[in-house]
Amino acid sequence: MLTDAQRSAVRSALLGRPLALCFGAGVDSTAMLVLLRLAGLRPSVITFADTGGEKPPTWAHLARIQALLREWGWPTVDVCRKATLSTTPYDDLEGNCLANETLPSLAFGLKSCSIKWKQQPQDQFLIGVSRGPARRSAHPLWRHAQARGQRIVKLIGYDCGKADRRRAAAAGRALGPCEYCYPLQLAGWSRADCVRAIEDHLGADMVPIKSACFFCPASRPWELFWLAGHHPELMDRALHVERRALTGRHSRFDDVDFGDDWEAMVRDAPSFPSTKTTVGLGRSFAWNHWARLNGVVDENFTVRRTRRARFIAIAAEQLQVDNALDRRACGALP
């Protein structure tokens, strides 16, 4: 999997530098662990950001990775979570959306939910916080790097696909107090290479599902069928988040702009009008509306539990080869 040239490229960029690996618990970050081990490199710290919305299979994969890291003699994953004030009525992203009657920022084409609930908690774990609910001392790696005049290198699992190359270009190399590096791109690994590396070196059962909140606006229709089939209770909660946001105090739907309110359109309209306004978790489509049209929910907009096997089968038919879990995403009822 790793040629001499690839190994040299990775080692020349990272050898002898303080390494902090950001583990997302998906295919790319899992493959990044394999790549570093093959290159003879070992991160000093590995962090995972818990938004409170990860799917159960992601937590199961994280537990398997923890066992693997102990076997390798590597540092285990430190789970980081945003700290909120005692007076704040929520402590996770789902609660934030419900309390403020809004959707994750990605539904509006923004990225603040990722920055606030993923990036910042991991940065604070390393750098420390002087005051407030997140107060903590700086990690020893940070103190050691500062004493030596070094910058911590944060390892991010972006592969060589077009989308990840765009993300890496947008993020750059030196944002904030740390330098960013993308080992998979140094080695020229595509998503297919990442899946193959995991299968060859860890086993096919270690290929994880895509790590994302169960109410992530980037979810594709096949993933919605998957969620309804495997975790209908999570789909119910996602639909509730959307309904509260689109019928709450921040809703932009009114009789003048759309001819009807959001609730009526979800229940009765065959489609939403063409608009630049975000109409739901899918940005251009509402999950509640999609669920009604596809027979996923009953008249109370609760997932039909008796149709779970059918939803799983549809998800298997619709998923594409470049999706994270690919061959393992759809299977029998748990």
Image (cartoon, rainbow, N blue to C red):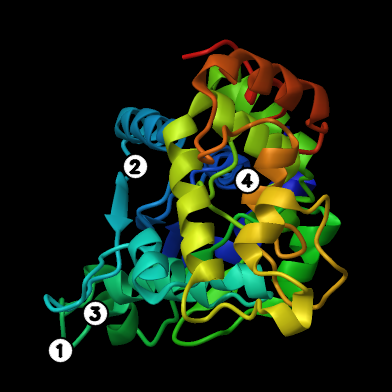
**Vertical placement of 300 versus 114: above or below?**
above
Q: Which residue is mark 1?
A: 131
Which percent across, then down, holds residue 100?
A: 39, 76
Name the residue: 44% across, 72% down: 101
Q: Residue furthest top?
A: 332
Specify the quadrant of the image occupied by residue 82.
Answer: bottom left
Q: Secondary structure at mark 4?
A: helix
Residue 242 seen: yes
- Left or right: 317 as drawn, with respect to 59: right
Q: Which residue is mark 4?
A: 28
Q: Mark 3 or mark 1, which is nearer to you?
A: 1
Q: Secondary structure at mark 2?
A: loop
> What numbered label is drawn on residue 275?
none
Residue 8 seen: no
Name the amino acid, label 4: Asp
Give the mark nearest the N terminus, 4 or 2: 4
Q: Secondary structure at mark 1?
A: loop
Tell me how far mark 1 sits from mark 2, CA to CA.
31 Å
Specify the quadrant of the image occupied by residue 290.
Answer: top right
Circle 4/circle 1 CB separation < 8 Å: no
Which percent across, then down, holds residue 318?
A: 81, 29
Q: Secondary structure at mark 3?
A: loop
- Left or right: 307 as drawn, with respect to 81: right
- Left or right: 334 as drawn, with respect to 3: left
Q: Which residue is mark 3?
A: 128
Name the amino acid, label 2: Trp
Name the amino acid, label 3: Gly
Q: Which residue is mark 2?
A: 74
Tell me how far mark 3 sits from mark 4, CA to CA.
27 Å
Give the mark nearest the N terminus, 3 or 2: 2
Tell me how far mark 3 sits from mark 1, CA to CA.
9 Å
